[in-house]
Image: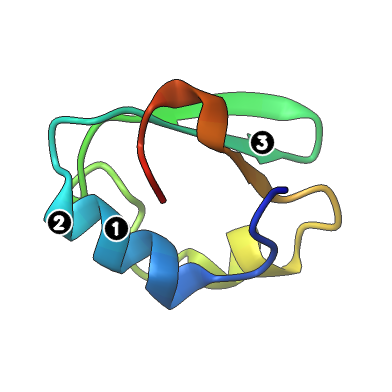
Amino acid sequence: MPITNPSSKIRKCLEENPVQRILVKRMGAAEEIANVDAFPAGNEVDFVTAASWSVDRSFGTGC
């Protein structure tokens, strides 16, 4: 089941698992985030408020 609107949880997961890929689906577009530095700091609101925002756990992130 996808996690919805967990900006802080995703950031924490990325910090703990920096080499693991996380697939973020934002408004139907897929964006791969390789590490916490690639996570767009300051743009969390864009991710959290996107209606279709979710994390695909099938990419081995363990998030």
Callout 2 secondary element: helix
Please report contact status of discs 2 and 1: CB closer than 8 Å, yes or no. yes
17 vs 53, nearest the viewer: 17
For label 3, the residue is 25
For label 1, the residue is 13
Distance from the alpha carbon under mark 2 to that under mark 1:
5 Å
Please report contact status of discs 2 and 3: CB closer than 8 Å, yes or no. no
- Of badges 2 and 3, nearer the viewer stands 2
Mark 2 neighbour density, 10 Å: few (under 14) some (14–19) many (20 or more): some
Say which label, 1 or 3, has the lower sequence index. 1
22 vs 44, nearest the viewer: 22
Residue 15 to residue 38: above or below: below
Looking at the rendered structure, the kind of residue marked 1 is Cys
Distance from the alpha carbon under mark 2 to that under mark 3:
21 Å
In the current view of this chain or complex, which residue is farthest to the right? 51
Residue 22's quadrant in the figure? top left
Mark 3 neighbour density, 10 Å: few (under 14) some (14–19) many (20 or more): some
Residue 23 to residue 18: above or below: above
Please report contact status of discs 1 and 3: CB closer than 8 Å, yes or no. no
Say which label, 2 or 3, has the lower sequence index. 2
